[in-house]
Image: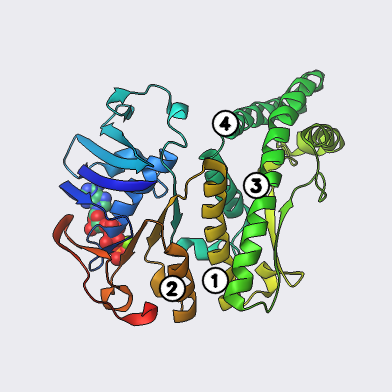
């Protein structure tokens, strides 16, 4: 999969700009606040079909304008495709695939695959479980349509069950109706649990190897799916019955709190190094290597599932990594298209890279590097 061209019309601080990408490394260079991340946000929008930065999408429309558009031309093998997202103030956004309006969002999920790595991901290990669940959900939603459906379904059921729990405190006869929601929650939840478990098994395999290469075999990285039902592997049916048992056990507590205390909305990823939790014992350097391994593993999982390697989007991440880790990530970019942003071009450029100089939402200059310097030479 390769991006051919990205056109941004009234998107963030871009008025009307087109970038023709090269197959290898594309560098968005410029000072702070010029539009580098905006550009990466637009590309990743085409994978997730939502912004990873803001909830209110009207913030994506250029100040003072009514409409915005992202147009992405990309190729899969010899096939060329176009994805277009049109934003209009106070109206739902519109999607077009190869010129045709696509009414259902789910028909476009997985159409364009990219993996993003930003400095914010470096907090993945130290922060709370919400961050790691969202890492799992972002990855799985773009790979598995049914996962997206089940996740949305689960969130709705959970809301309904919690509303009923609150009513049960006032009117205990309503307890009888909880069984209906328990069954529905276990049905959707068991799909999510199984998908997360399977995904983490694959992610662990790749991440472990990457970590071994970065740290030169010093310690072993292990990623485990952590849920309230079991630490062992389970089939979907087992998850279903374990989930129901758990809901039954915590029912009185749920009613007292007016909240469902158990379920996949409490899941986490346990990240171990040499058997010890990285969250509590990992050094800065170890954490950076582990996150880098997880992100590269995420790209491998996409390639395994979809049959083509995704586009790597690296937003200002290289300045966060030391020369050794930079060198490692560059070795993994070989043969894959990458879009990266930086304020310090001198350090990373190498022969053949295409550099776009971004200033105030415009590409003021672009050129293919004829020489390079820094960590990768
Ligand atoms: N809807 C919008 N309309 C116009 N400009 C916007 C809009 N949203 C954000 N911007 C502008 O975009 C700029 C930020 O762009 P971006 O986040 O891409 O910067 P950057 O080049 O990545 O900078 P840094 O190196 O600091 O990360 C800011 O000047 C901001 O005011
Ligand atoms: Mg930025």
The residue that mark 3 highlights is 199
Q: What SS does tag 1 mark?
A: helix
Task: In the rendered view, tell whether residue 71 sits above or below residue 160.
Answer: below
Q: Position of residue 150 (x, y in %)?
A: 62, 30
Earlier residue among tags 1 and 4: 4
In the structure shown, which secondary structural element does the residue marked by tag 3 occupy?
helix
Q: Residues within 10 Å of mark 1 (few under 14, many from 20)?
A: many
What percent of the width, then of the height, locates residue 9? 19, 41
Say which quarter of the image contains residue 198: top right
Q: Which residue is mark 4?
A: 152
> Of residues 1 and 318, which is closer to you in this image?
1
Query: For the point 33% across and 74% down, which residue is it?
Result: 348
Nearer to us: label 4 or label 3: 3
Marked residue nearer the N-terminal end (2 or 4): 4
Residue at far left of view: 364
- Structural distance between the alpha carbons of marks 4 and 3: 19 Å
Marks 1 and 2 close (CB-CB < 8 Å): yes
Query: Which residue is tagged 1?
Result: 288
Q: What residue would you read off at disc 2? A: 320
Ligand 1 neighbours mark 2 (CB distance < 8 Å): no
- Give the Cα separation between the discs numbered 3 and 2: 27 Å
Q: For mark 3, does the 10 Å Cα neighbourhood hold few (<14), some (14 to 19), or many (20 or more) residues?
A: some
Indicate left or right for 265 with 139 as reference.
right
- The mark closer to the camera, 1 or 3, is 3
**Mark 2 or mark 1, which is nearer the start of the sequence?**
1
User: Tag 2: Cα neighbours inside 10 Å, few (<14), some, or many (≥20)?
Assistant: few
Q: Is label 3 or label 2 in front?
A: 3
């Amino acid at each position: 999969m390769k991006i051919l061209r990205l056109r941004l019309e009234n998107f963030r601080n871009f008025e009307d700009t087109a970038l023709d990408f090269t197959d290898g490394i594309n560098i968005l260079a410029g000072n702070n606040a010029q539009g580098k991340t905006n550009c990466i946000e637009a590309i990743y929008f085409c994978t997730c079909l939502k912004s990873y930065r803001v909830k209110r999408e009207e913030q994506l429309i250029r100040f003072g304008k009514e409409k915005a558009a992202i147009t992405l031309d990309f190729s899969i093998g010899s096939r060329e495709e176009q994805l277009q997202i049109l934003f209009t103030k106070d109206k739902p956004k519109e999607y077009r695939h190869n010129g045709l309006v696509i009414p259902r969002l789910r028909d476009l999920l997985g159409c364009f695959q990219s993996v993003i790595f930003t400095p914010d991901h470096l907090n993945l290990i130290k922060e709370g479980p919400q961050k790691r669940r969202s890492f799992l959900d972002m990855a799985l939603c773009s790979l598995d349509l049914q996962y997206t459906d089940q996740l949305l379904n689960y969130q709705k059921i959970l809301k309904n069950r919690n509303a009923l729990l609150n009513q049960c405190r006032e009117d205990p006869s309503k307890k009888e109706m909880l069984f209906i929601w328990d069954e529905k929650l276990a049905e959707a939840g068991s799909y999510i649990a199984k998908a997360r478990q399977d995904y983490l098994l694959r992610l662990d395999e790749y991440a472990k190897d990457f970590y071994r290469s970065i740290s030169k075999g010093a310690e072993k990285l292990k990623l485990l799916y952590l849920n309230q039902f079991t630490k062992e592997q389970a089939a979907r049916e087992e998850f279903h019955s374990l989930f129901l048992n758990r809901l039954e056990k915590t029912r009185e507590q749920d009613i007292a709190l007016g909240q469902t205390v158990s379920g996949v909305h409490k899941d986490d990823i346990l990240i171990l190094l040499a058997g010890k939790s990285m969250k509590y014992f990992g050094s800065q350097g170890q954490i950076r290597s582990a996150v880098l391994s997880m992100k590269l593993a995420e790209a491998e999982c996409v390639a395994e599932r979809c049959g083509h390697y995704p586009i790597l989007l690296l937003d200002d991440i290289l300045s966060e990594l030391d020369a050794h880790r930079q060198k490692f990530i560059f070795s993994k970019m070989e043969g894959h298209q990458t879009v990266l942003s930086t304020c310090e071009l001198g350090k990373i450029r190498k022969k053949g890279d295409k550099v776009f100089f971004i200033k105030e939402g415009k590409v003021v200059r672009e050129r293919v590097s004829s020489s390079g310097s820094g960590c990768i030479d």
